[in-house]
Image: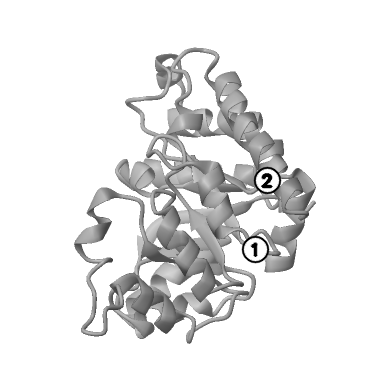
Amino acid sequence: MDRKRLIHLIKERQSYLSVGLDTDKDRIPTFLLDKEDPIFEFNKAIIDATRDVCVAYKPNLAFYECYGAEGWKSFEKTVEYIGKDHFIIADAKRGDIGNTSTRYAKAFFENIAADGLTVAPYMGEDSVKPFLLQDGQWVILLALTSNPGSADFQNIKSDGGEPLYVSVIKKAIQWASDEQLMFVVGATHPEQLAEIRKLVPNYFFLIPGVGAQGGDLRSVSKSAINADIGMIVNSSRSIIYASDGEDFAAKARQKAIELQSEMAHILKDNSII
């Protein structure tokens, strides 16, 4: 999905919401466990309930790969069921030497046909470049993540006082334009988010951490928004685990609509729609 199409979907649905599919068998409603593929059945119900109020889905690969081949089948079926009218983010956090990254790129961009893949930048340019060879498919580079431990390395300052995450962003924009590259910036860092927006005014951000991790949608949006919206905000647990009963899909829809409605107001307040 290219940038123009993504922006169109955001405006059309008045939403920049991504629903994170961190589907844990230990947390899904127990009545689904009798199904042939409980993970897919849960995902299918969540997708049906939220399809019209979000622009993206973000399956977290750890929740599929832990079940081996069967988990990978659930992931493939989920991506196929989502279809082409949503931005599909494979949250796999890949990144390795060039020939290995080339194979990861083939797995997620050719075989799975995801629109975006989260990539770790630690190994440098040659570990990222293989993911940038497909038109309309995006590298979503880890910059400043929402977990508490992000400060262990991402905030380390160089002799000139520049945090490592800033150095990563400055280097990465030499590799790809805002048509192919996004940055992961956690919702729990609104002050740094505003600084990063000044550094890369036209790039899209994937912003996790709204909801269960404590990120505030309005604060995040104020810091990150640009003329083209410029962000996809992900919420996972607070949506998909809004209920563990037979009403789980309806409750998920309710939570998604709450976020989408707030997003619509923000878009209107900023004269984007």
Q: Are marks 2 and 1 in contact (CB under 8 Å)?
A: no
Q: Residue at x 42, y 57 (%)?
A: 191
Query: Does residue 237 lie above or below 20 as drawn?
Result: above
Is the residue marked by circle 2 packed among few (<14), some (14-19), or many (20+) residues within 10 Å? many
Label 1: element kind: loop
Q: Is residue 111 visible?
A: no
**Quadrant in the rendering for residue 158:** bottom left
**Quadrant in the rendering for residue 143:** bottom left
Label 2: element kind: helix
In the picture of the structure, the residue carrying the numbered disc 1 is 226
Tell me how far mark 2 sits from mark 1, CA to CA. 12 Å
Q: Amino acid at mark 2?
A: Ile
Is the residue marked by circle 1 packed among few (<14), some (14-19), or many (20+) residues within 10 Å? some
Query: Does residue 88 lie above or below 94 as drawn?
Result: above
Residue 231 locus on image (x, y percent) = 58, 57
Q: Amino acid at mark 1?
A: Asn
Q: Is residue 214 visible?
A: yes
Query: Does residue 211 lie above or below 156 as drawn?
Result: above
Q: Residue at x 52, y 28 (%)?
A: 41
Residue 190 locus on image (x, y percent) = 44, 54
Q: Earlier in the sequence, mark 2 or mark 1?
A: 1
In the picture of the structure, the residue carrying the numbered disc 2 is 266
Residue 138 locus on image (x, y percent) = 55, 68
Residue 47 locus on image (x, y percent) = 60, 35
Q: Residue at x 76, y 47 (%)?
A: 268
Q: Residue at x 39, y 57 (%)?
A: 92
Q: Is residue 67 left or right of residue 259?
A: left
Closer to the camera in the image, 169 or 68: 169
Closer to the camera in the image, 12 or 169: 169
Q: How is the image coloured?
A: one colour
Q: Quadrant of the N terminus?
A: bottom right
Q: Is residue 138 left or right of residue 37?
A: right
